[in-house]
Structures are given as structure tokens and as C-alpha cells.
Image (spheres, helix red, strand yellow):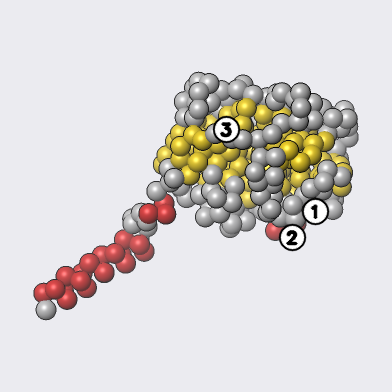
């Protein structure tokens, strides 16, 4: 009888811990270690500052860098597949792959946002090339792209403007929010943007050292402080990782926006960073981090 009692108490305690969120499962314990990357660059090409990276559903990697052949595509083995963008991209910044495997980039040199097919065909161009501005059809150094429900696109705009712009899937302007400043709902360089599984828009307010969270219409819900969110990415389980370019670290945040783990320090060795910029997760849960200062791409292997 005593044995049955102990079992019942133990099970009850377990259930209570799970329901109150105080139980940490093995799946929550994430650890990474630096790992080598074997990518085959085109002959004679040397990477410039690496700005962004992402993966499509077939495991192909797209790397955005500030140099010739700015958009580079590699297969799962690291073999070079194709590149494009020389006559179009002014200066690389953000790159995201949408649910249909189309590649979106932000160009802070020409103040444009482009959508490409996986083969590099231009599908959509937003903005006025070489003409920065704050109208509905202009950007001023746009920084990042996020994908919402119904195919809506959210763009952080960015260095010159302090706003988030919302577009329909066909590029039609829908709305915007944000003004310069340090107050709630204001921005000082909205540098990264992502939409979570609850349809909340997370904006990395870089120079204010915070993430501001909005609903799909731009109503402020929450603010997380204490780090410089240069880049943000979710893994398949909804874990949020942040590239803190000021601290030269990669951070893991919990659901309340608190830093629960971090990797890296300033340096040029494996697992060290010189201005980590944006990051992506592959299908195996490994992290890939681009570096502006280090002019490289680093891999953090998930253990």
C-alpha cells in the first residue's frame, strides 16, 4: 500500500509541475558546439561580410553576402548550385525563405525588397530603386522580412525609417506602424522581424536593446529587454534564438523573453564572433550564424 501511495504522489507531483510550467523536459535542454562547414564556393570567389542565411524545404542553403554573386545557393552536401544578384543588389542585408520556397531579400544599398524563385528568377520588387523615402511605395534601408498568415509580408524598415510595413502576398501595401523613439511602440533601428506560431510579430528594436511584440495589426503586446537583437530565428519547436551583435553571442530565449542560454564570445576562433548578424536553423536543428565583421558563416551543431 505504501508503494502505491508513493507512486500516486510522485505522479501527482509530476503532473503539477508540468501544468505549472516548472518542469523542464529533456527537450528543453539545448546545447550546441562549433562545427565545421563544408561549402563549395565558386572558383575565385571570396566571401565578403556575411549578412543572412536561410534554408528551403529541400535543405538547400541560401547565403547572402556583400560581394560578387551576393546570393549563393548550396545543396545539402554544401555543393555550389547557383548564384545571382550582381546587377541588382546594392548591399546585402536580410534574407528569408518563405513557405513556398521563394527567396526574399532586403537591399539596403538600393532601398529595395526582392522576391526570387529558387532558381533566381525575379518575381516581385518592392520599393523605388535608389530612391529612399517614407511613402507607401518606398523604403529607406529595409532590414528584414517576415511571413504572416494569408501570405502577408511584414518588412522592418529599418535604418532610415523606424517602422514596420505590412503587404499582401502580391505586394499590395496594407498598413504600417512605428515612429522613431525609445517609448513603447517606437523604434530605434528595427533590424529584425519574425512572426511566431501565435501570429505575433516580434520586432528586434536593435538600438533600444529590446524586442517589441505586436499583434498582426501593430498593437503592442509585450516588450523584452536586455540584449541587442540583430537577428532572430525560431527552430521547429518554437525555441527562439537571437544573434546579439553587440555582445558577440548567440542567445536562447524562453517564452517570457528571458535569456536562458548563450554561446560565444568576441573573437575569430570557432564559436567566437565578430558581429554576428542573422541566423537560421536547418532541418536537424543546427544553427547557422552569419558574421559581418568576421566575413564568414559559422555552424553550431546541436547535441
Q: Quadrant of residue 105?
A: top right
Q: Which residue is mark 2?
A: 150
Mark toward the start of the polypeptide (3 vs 2): 2
Mark toward the start of the polypeptide (3 vs 1): 1
The mark lying in front, picked from 3 and 1, is 3
Residue at 84 percent across and 30 percent down: it is 86
Residue lying furthest bottom in this view? Answer: 1
Q: Which residue is mark 3?
A: 298
Residue at 37 percent across and 54 percent down: it is 26
Residue 149 position, x and y percent, is 70, 58
Residue at 22 percent across and 73 percent down: it is 8
Between residues 287 and 157, which one lies in front from this camera angle?
287
Between residues 111 and 98, which one lies in front from this camera angle?
98
Do labels 1 and 2 touch, CB within 8 Å?
yes
Q: Is residue 257 above or below residue 229?
A: below
Q: Is residue 260 above or below residue 8?
A: above
Mark toward the start of the polypeptide (1 vs 2): 2
What secondary structure is found at the residue carrying circle 3?
strand
Q: CA distance from mark 3 to mark 1?
A: 34 Å
Classify residue 176 as left or right of residue 205: right
* Residue 101, visible in the rendered structure: yes
Question: For the residue carrying disc 2, how many other residues have a C-alpha within 10 Å: few (<14), some (14-19), or many (20+)?
Answer: few
What secondary structure is found at the residue carrying circle 1?
loop
Q: Quadrant of residue 155?
A: top right
Residue at 62 percent across and 27 percent down: it is 296
Residue 83 position, x and y percent, is 79, 36
Classify residue 40 as left or right of residue 275: right
Q: Which residue is mark 1?
A: 168
Classify residue 247 as left or right of residue 189: left
Amino acid at each position: 500500500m505504501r508503494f502505491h501511495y508513493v507512486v500516486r504522489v510522485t505522479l501527482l507531483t509530476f503532473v503539477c509541475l508540468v501544468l505549472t510550467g516548472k518542469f523542464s523536459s529533456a527537450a528543453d535542454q539545448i546545447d550546441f558546439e562549433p562545427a565545421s562547414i563544408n561549402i563549395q564556393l565558386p572558383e575565385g570567389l571570396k566571401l565578403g561580410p556575411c549578412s543572412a542565411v536561410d534554408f528551403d524545404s529541400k535543405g538547400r542553403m541560401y547565403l547572402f553576402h556583400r560581394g560578387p554573386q551576393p546570393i549563393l545557393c548550396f545543396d545539402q552536401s554544401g555543393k555550389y548550385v547557383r548564384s545571382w544578384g550582381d546587377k541588382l543588389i546594392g548591399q546585402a542585408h536580410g534574407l528569408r525563405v518563405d513557405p513556398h520556397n521563394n527567396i526574399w531579400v532586403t537591399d539596403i544599398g538600393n532601398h529595395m525588397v526582392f522576391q526570387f524563385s529558387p532558381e533566381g528568377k525575379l518575381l516581385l520588387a518592392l520599393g523605388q530603386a535608389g530612391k529612399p523615402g517614407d511613402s507607401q511605395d518606398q523604403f529607406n534601408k529595409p532590414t528584414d522580412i517576415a511571413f504572416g498568415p494569408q501570405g502577408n509580408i511584414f518588412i522592418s524598415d529599418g535604418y532610415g525609417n523606424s517602422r514596420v510595413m505590412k503587404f499582401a502576398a502580391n505586394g499590395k501595401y496594407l498598413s504600417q506602424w512605428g515612429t522613431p523613439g525609445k517609448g513603447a511602440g517606437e523604434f530605434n533601428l528595427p533590424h529584425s522581424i519574425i512572426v511566431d506560431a501565435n501570429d505575433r510579430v516580434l520586432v528586434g528594436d536593435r538600438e533600444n536593446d529590446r524586442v517589441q511584440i505586436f499583434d498582426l495589426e501593430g498593437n503592442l503586446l509585450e516588450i523584452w529587454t536586455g540584449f541587442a537583437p540583430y537577428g532572430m530565428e525560431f527552430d521547429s519547436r518554437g525555441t527562439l534564438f537571437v544573434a546579439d551583435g553587440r555582445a558577440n553571442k548567440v542567445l536562447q530565449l524562453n517564452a517570457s523573453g528571458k535569456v536562458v542560454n548563450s554561446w560565444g564570445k568576441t573573437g575569430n576562433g570557432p564559436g567566437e564572433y565578430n558581429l554576428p548578424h542573422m541566423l537560421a536553423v536547418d532541418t536537424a536543428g543546427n544553427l547557422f550564424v552569419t558574421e559581418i565583421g568576421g566575413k564568414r558563416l559559422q555552424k553550431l551543431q546541436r547535441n
